[in-house]
Image: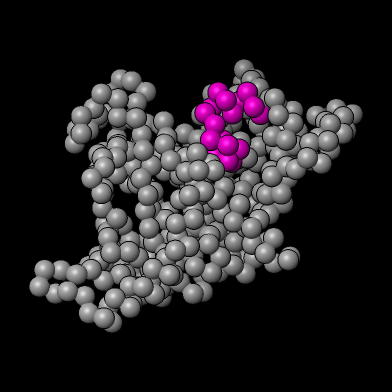
Amino acid sequence: MKSFEKYFMNKQYSRVKELGDKLAEIDPLIDWEFFRPIVRGMYDNRSERGGRPNIDEIVMIKMLVLQSWYGLSDPELERQANDRISFQKFLGFPERIPDRSTVWAFRERLIDTGKDERIWEELQRQIDIKGLKVKEGVIQDATFITADPGHQRVNETRGPEAKTRRNKEGEWAKKNGKSHYGYKLHTLTDIDYGLIRRIETTTAKVHDSQTDLSESGEVVYRDRGYFGAACKGYNATMKRAVRGHPLGIRDKRRNKRIVRKRSAGERPYAVIKNIFKSGHLLVTTTLRVHTKNLFTCFCYNLLQLKTLQKINTT
């Protein structure tokens, strides 16, 4: 973008900033340049026949952050990125805004190369060097991320032969008498700072206890649904009464202590579903859902970093 045009855009944006811009608050929280080498060379439009120049790697990553932050489809992301000056400022006023097909292709290549996971690892590295390492312990939990079952009946899988845009790999699960179709987002959240440290995505049918996100040396607080499940860390799972073996007073008191520790683990899901509107996804496979979940959790951590920053400055 030419210097005059950039000056004019910044002048216009200053009026928006006076009214409050959340994107301007989260932009400086991390060093985006460290993500560049992760995705560099992942897409290349250069050829003997020419072609449009490549879009900046950071712009592409930030587009996915914008998408998750505002719960936008690819077409709506393209429209708003061209329309909203706060979006363009967050992107660095690029020469060209990526269109919907470019965004889709970039996300698919992240999935195919596994570089979405490397982006997550880099975010965790930056969190750690801020001095926000896990100390007191972590909370493991899971929540349903629903999808569109179409005309599929309960306990039937649509499968890869499904020819509509509706979900192909989701499964049914029942909890508290209510049926859910789609997936589960499993998270490990640290107690000290409320940041999501690890995630996994499975179909809804996979029981919480079948996923262990802990690592050796960590104290892991889990609810009764994980009772009896394997744990690589120090197992602080709530006890559950079984036939012929009711809970004693010590176990009941222990459960109450764990409940108090685990209470912070519900906040990420409230933010993900109520603020980022990501409790229901329209993508069609487990890998695509996982990448969507990853960027939503990325956004949650940015929001939490801003919250921690405000706490430390008051």
Q: Position of residue 158 (x, y in %)?
A: 24, 29
Q: Is residue 19 left or right of residue 221?
A: right
What's the residue at 69%, 34% (across, down)? 87
State whether residue 281 is above or below residue 222.
above
- Nearer to the camera, 123 or 47: 123
What's the residue at 53%, 41% (across, down)? 276
State whether residue 270 is above or below residue 171.
below
Query: Could you tell me if residue 126 is visible in this image?
Result: no
Query: Could you tell me if residue 121 is visible in this image?
Result: yes
Q: Position of residue 211 (x, y in %)?
A: 31, 57
Q: Residue furthest bottom?
A: 250
| Magenta-drawn stretch, dominant element (helix, strand or loop) | helix
Residue 20, quarter of picture? top right
Chosen colour scheme: one colour
Q: Residue furthest left?
A: 244
Q: Position of residue 1 (x, y in %)?
A: 80, 29
Q: Is residue 12 left or right of residue 314?
A: right
What's the residue at 49%, 46% (across, down)? 272
Magenta-tinted stretch: 65-81
Residue 145, quarter of picture? top left
State whether residue 259 is above or below residue 164.
below
Q: Residue furthest top?
A: 49
Screen quadrant of the C terminus: bottom right
Q: Position of residue 247 (x, y in %)?
A: 21, 75
Residue 258, quarter of picture? bottom left
Is residue 106 within the magenta segment? no
Is residue 69 within the magenta segment? yes
